[in-house]
Structures are given as C-alpha cells and as structure tokens.
Image (cartoon, coloured by chain):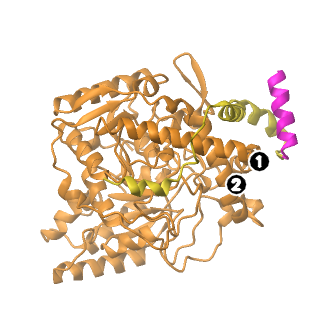
Chain colours: A yellow, B orange
Amino acid sequence: MQQTEQLRQRMAAAGVELPPGLVEVVVLAAGPMITSLDGLLTLELDGLEPFVPARLADAAV
Amino acid sequence: MQTRLAGLSVAEVRAALRAREASAVEVAEACLEGLRTRAGMHAFVTITAADALTAARAADAALARGDAGPLAGVPVAVKDLLAVRGVSRTNGSAAFAGDPPAAADAGAVARLRAAGAVIVGTTHLHELAFGPTGVNPALGTPVNPWAADRVPGGSSSGSGAAVAARLVPAALGTDTGGSIRVPASFCGVTGLKPTYGRVSRAGVTPLAWTLDHVGPLARSVEDAALVLGALAGHDPDDPASARVPVPDYPALLTRPLRSVRVGVPRDFACALIEPEVAAAFETALGELRRAGAVVSEVAIPSLVHTGPTLGAIILAEARSAIAPLLAGRHEGVGVELQVYMELGKLVSAEHYLAAQRVRSRLHEETRAVLARVDLLATPATVLAAPRIDELQVRIGDTEVGAVEAICRLSGPFNLTGLPALALPCGFTSDGRPIGLQLVGRPFAEADVLSAGHAYQLATDWHRRPPPV
C-alpha cells in the first residue's frame, strides 16, 4: 500500500497525466517495472561507457 | 491450381516460376484471392492488388529474359510501419488514418522490389510497434491461426499471422524488443532479427533508435535466408547502416552442424519458464546434439538486468521519437500508447545512461561467451501465446507482467544487437506453437541460419499447417 502511494506520488511529481480510472491499473501492471528502473542506479558500472550499437560493425566476422 | 499456388513457400514459388509450372501473375492472383477470401484473419491493412499485378508482370518478363532477381515473382507483405510507395501508412494507429500515401519506399521495401519481389500489401501491428502482444483495439487484432483466443504476438502481428496462415510466403517485420521473434514464436513461423545495422531502417517509423531492427518472417530458415539476401546491405539513408560485406546466405545454408559449439545460458533462460516450453527446448537441444553440435552451459550474469534496461531505453527513446509524431493527433491515440508515452516521463537521464552502460556490460559478457562458443540457444519466448485479455501471466508459482514475460528472452539481443533467429520447435498440449532461438556473433547471420536450417532438416515443426 505504501509502495503504491509512493508510485502515485512519483508519477505526479514527474508530470505523468493519466485518466483517473487508469491510475490503479497502471500502478498494478507497470509498478514493478517502474520500481525496477531504480535498480539500475545502484549497479557498479565503473569503467563502462554507454553502448553504441553501430560499433558492432567493428566486430564483424 | 490457385489454391496450390497460394500456399507456396518462397523456395517453392521460385522453383515453380523457374520450371515454368506457373507464371508470376498466376502466383500473385492466387495470393490476392487468398487475401480476399480470408480477410477474416485481419492480417492486412491495405492490399496493393494493382501494384502487385504490375510487379508480377515485370517479374514474368524478367524471368523470360533470364535476368530475374532472386525474389522474382515472390509475394511479400510489409508491416505497416514501413513506407510503401503509394500506400497510406497507419503505423497501427487510428491517429494516422487519412495520412497521404508515401511518396517513396522504405529502404528495405526498395531492396525487395529490386530483387523482383511482389509487394501484395501492408500488415497490422501493435500500435506504433509499442507492445509485444499484437493486440490492437482500434484497428483490430490479427487472428493467431493456431488459437483464435490467443494473441498473435507483436508487434509484427499481421506479418506473423499472414505467414502462418499461408496467406503470403514471407513478410517484413521490425524488432525492438522481440517484435519479429515473438510473433514467429507464437504463430509457429521462422523469424530473423538480423544484426543491428545489417538491414536498412530508412523509411521505418522509429520506436527506439538504438534498438530498432528490420527483418523477415517466413515459413522456413531457407526462406528467411533468401529474403535476407535481398534485404541486407549498406544504405546511406540509414545513419546506423553498416558497411559490412553481405555473404551469399542461401549458399551457406548447408554447412553441417558437426562440431558447432552451442552455449545455453540456462541460469537465466530456464529460470522462469512454462514447463511445456522448457521440455520442448530440451528436446530441441537434443536434436542439435544429434546433428553433431556440442552443447554446453554458459553464464551471462547481466541477463538478469534485461527487463529494466530494455524498459528504460524503450520508454525514453520512444517518448522522444513518437511524441512529436503524435502532436495534433491525440484523438486517435490508443490508451496503451498514451500510458507508455506518459511513463516515459519517469525515465531520468541517469536511468537512461545507466541502462546504456549496463548494455555495454551485457555486450562484453556476451562477446566473451561467443569467443568460446559459436552460437547461443534459448527458447524464443518463455511462454506460448497467452490469452488476449491477460495483462499478468502465471509461470509456475510466479505472477509476472505479460510484457516482461514475453520479451524476457528476445530483449537481450536487441540490447546487444546480435543476430537472433526464432524457429518452431514444438507445441503445447493444447496446440500452441513453441519457439527456439539461436543467436550468433555480430553479422554472423549465416552461422545462425545454417544451424537453424540443419535443425529444420531434422524436424518438421515448421512444416505443420495451422487449423485456421
């Protein structure tokens, strides 16, 4: 319940605009995914630059 | 005669035309008749009959002259996310209804035409390609030919359903998180997501620039190789297009599987999976071993971060790519797409960059594994096609979001950009198709295709026709 309310507040703070009837559904269906985004910020990523997919050509077989 | 011609594969059409058993016009007429009589499949948005017959006449002339292209006279459908000259593109959304027809073909479509293919129409999709089920409340959901109460898979839903139902021998799809391989898996056909940059994205409505791919859906690996041969190559109109030589894919298909090393990232691939999918996957690995492959387990630890990594990148890039396209069109935008556009506001720059850096780690780990093995194998999806109304699915004791479950094993190879092939490897007890996925090194589509072809020579899952 607390997590649901936090998610609701987070969406409001980010300016997320949803039809009132949809908020519950979105919190239920997408809540875990939204929360999981923050897990990315806790990972140890030292030495890693953002991926550049076009560089795959350098590794072509 | 027409019925027989309508159900031919790419290889069979080529053989029939070259043996003068039929003309390209006869093949096109049979295909168009099938599209009319089976309109209830709801696979097609637009049927380009006049244009198709003109192309078929040109193919017949080229065949008579002896200078026909590799796909001369082969009917092909195109996902309605790619520009097709003279056709109004919906992008799977009522918001684009009434847009003027495209003045020019997308790069991939132009290559198909140059190879002699006969474009017969455009196919339905998940709205703006943003979703893996293919369910489209506004424009309609294509019928899964194996199970009408189940999703066809998306976002290239119409392309998957059309190929499975034998309406066309091949179709184009796009794949940002699994949108070629998911409908291939759920509809029991073969689908290839090539390496990022291998096939032009010019003239394709973007969803997420760093994840978007174009590729074929077809009935067999042989057919997919024939279509890829026409599609692949550098296109100056696509800034991500690679200048990497294109091999003769069909000629390389018959390389044996003997001693090919296949790695299975089992810890991730089989951690959350429907039991019948797991069983079919193990049987498929057994077939690969019998064909001479050396199968071993490998570890790619960062696969566990696929969900949030893919989510952050798609939500952020799609909001940037799509929101401007929807300006002034809000009346026709579906609820699901509206929600995704709004959720994109929750992805900060920190989230986005962390996701792109996780992606680098996943790439490094995968590259290290692919230095020790030639291919990776996983199920294409961890579940067979779910019901149309399922937002959550239960896998074993775990309740999980349907989108996350569906993209769990396809998403990693959008993140890494590696070539990934989905092909049929069995059925559930209630008759829904199950897919196998084979993944190769960058631009090693030929390795993936030859392994898949060897598997299809030893099995007949891809030859079984659906009941609808």
State whether the magenta stretch is mostly helix, strand or loop: helix
Can residue A6 be found in the magenta stretch?
Answer: yes
- The answer to whether one can see residue B147 in this image is no
* Up/down of B65 relative to A5, above or below: below
Residue at the location (51% across, 34% down)?
B408
Give the image quarter of residue B312.
Answer: top right
Give the image quarter of residue B384.
Answer: top left
Question: What residue does disc 1 label?
Answer: B345
Tags 1 and 2 in contact by the CB under 8 Å rule? yes
Does dot 2 land on a helix, a strand or a loop?
helix
Does dot 1 land on a helix, a strand or a loop?
helix
Q: Which residues are magenta?
A: A1-15
Residue at the location (66% across, 66% down)?
B96
**Callout 2: chain:** B
**Callout 1: chain:** B
Please name whichever residue, B444 or B274, is drawn nearer the observer in this view of the structure. B444
The kind of residue on which mark 2 rests is Arg
User: x, y (%) of residue B336?
Assistant: 69, 46
Question: What residue does disc 2 label?
Answer: B319
Please name whichever residue, B47 or B379, is drawn nearer the observer in this view of the structure. B379
